[in-house]
Amino acid sequence: MTAIYLLVLASILQILSYSDAGFIAYEDARKAVIQAEDLLITGGRIHLNDKEDRVNDIFMRYKLDELGAGFYDSDVNAAGLHFFKAKRLVEKSKVLRFLKRMPKGATLHLHHSASVSSEWMVRNISYMPGMLRCTNNLGVNVLSFRRTPRDHGCVTQYVRVSDERFRSVSPVAYDRSFEKLINLYTPTPETDYPTIKHVWRKFQNMFSTINDVLRYLPAFRAYTWRMLEELYEDNVMYAEVRMDFKELYDYSGRIFPPERSVREVLTIVEDFRRVHPNFLGIKVIFSTHRNVERTRVFENFEMFKTLHTANPEFIIGFDLVGQEDLGKPLHNFIGELADLPKSAKYFFHAGETNWYGASTDFNLLDALLLNTTRIGHGFALMKHPVLWNAVKKRNVAIEVSPLSNQILHLVADLRNHPGSFYMSQNLPMVICNDDPGFWDTKGLSYDFYYAIMSLAPNHVGLKTLKSLVWNSIRHSVLTRREETVAFENLERLWDQFINDVLQGSVV
């Protein structure tokens, strides 16, 4: 690293002195700066082999063709458009098709209850017998499979979804309408979600809509299996998933304790790995909402410790979730979170905000003081040089979720995302998908698309992609044995992917 900074210093000196030496010195200074920045950027020090160089040439043709078209016509510049406006363009993209086939390692920031595509939810979960729907006093639709549904503040009677669908003019139209209950997509985000308040209200309401459905044992099993399938189909081999472990229920009315939820997930993952041996599995970050009383956080933290003690290599850590700007700051819960088991870790959401110097972005400071292993989002980190230097020195990875940050109103044009700065400084970062089911995507490829097309410089390609993929394993909480297996599998799958591209079978 010292040699790189010496090169940067030399390039700066050349800039300062070029005017005395004429045009040749100017060109030398210019090349030196570009070279120095390329070495600093994420993936800048990776060396590609001959095959990878050829694949990079292919990928860069796709990338530069799309960026070139967008440079001259902003209407087709997916890299600079809101994803909902650009989705049609992105799904025709050769870059996206390349990324879908590329091994992506792991996603390290994924919320279980928003991990599965809404299309699948409609076609499968909503057709399960016994689903009920009501509207609560906030105008939010609530779904359940309970024979005697709990009081969710409903102001309408529960009705059977199957009966509504049967009585509708068109079941297809009904399903389209139903899907909107759990999908933020709109062709006009600027009018439907004019402010951060509007989009977060709809976003949080969708969790309320689906929460009780995912406590229903048959739905929980099918949904969790499908989460693994959508990751696997997108060439993701491992995930660290944020979820809680609440009681489950079945149609007869039996209630099962949180420990049953843990056993169910472990069984599903084991069964899935038997069918798909290349998939390494998942680990869970226990999460609870930050906008609750301190006593509730304490109770949930105690539950986490109990579950972690029984499953230390599966339930690996703890986090607080929910909108940071409206939730309680991390500093409020220091006392409740003081007794973390030595075998567990923190993975705090922090800095998911546009504010500067508010309690919200100081969550970053408290997360680091609490020795968080990674930072969820870290959007505001760029404004805090002491903190981002600490992140770099301590190798605390930032979980960057481009689509989430745009859709939830932190940044309109992803070319302005602070991830570009983190990438330029080679800060430890991983690309994550957060809540893909809620914004009409599957897997991780869409976030990788914006990482390489919007966050990264125009001229970088496979080196940066490969670095981000390898980072996802490097910054995971896999054991040493598991990490060794992960890298062995990743190398094998990566080599096969490179060969497939060269043989013309990828795009």
Image (spheres, rainbow, N blue to C red):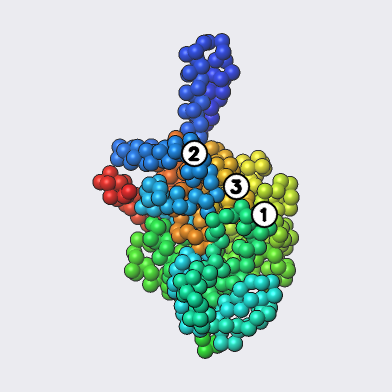
Q: Is residue 166 visible?
A: yes
**C-alpha separation, residue under disc 3 versus residue under disc 2:** 18 Å
Specify few, some or many for label 1: CA neighbours under 10 Å numbering under 14, 14-19, or 20 or more.
some
* Label 3 close to label 2 by CB (< 8 Å): no
Residue 300 is situated, as x and y percent measured from the top left of the image, at 64, 71
Of the image marks 3 and 2, the number of the one nearer the N terminus = 2
Residues at discs 1 and 2 in contact (Cβ within 8 Å):
no
Q: Residues within 10 Å of mark 3 (few under 14, many from 20)?
A: some
Q: Residue at x 37, y 38 (%)?
A: 61
| Residue in the picture at 44% in, 38% down | 69
Report which quarter residue 202 is drawn in. bottom right
The correct choice, above or below, for 150 with respect to 41 in the image is below
Q: Crowding near pointer 2: few (<14 within 10 Å), some, many (20+)?
A: few
Residue 340 in view in this figure: no
Viewer-closest of 220 and 320: 220
**Circle 1 sits on which residue?**
195
- Residue type at mark 1: give it: Thr
456 w.r.t. 325: above or below: above
Q: Position of residue 238 (x, y in %)?
A: 43, 59
Residue at (53% x, 37% y) in the render: 424
Residue 450, image x, y percentages: 49, 47
Helix, strand or loop for disc 3: loop
Amino acid under label 3? Ala
Mark 1 or mark 2, whichever is nearer to me: 2
Residue bearing mark 2: 73
Identify whether 325 is placed above or below 457: below
Distance in Å between CA atoms under marks 1 and 2: 27 Å
| Disc on the earlier residue, 1 or 2 | 2
Expressed as whole percent of the image width and height from the top left, the position of residue 293 reads 73, 69
Q: Is residue 159 above or below residue 49?
A: below
Q: Which residue is mark 3?
A: 412
Tag 1 secondary structure: loop
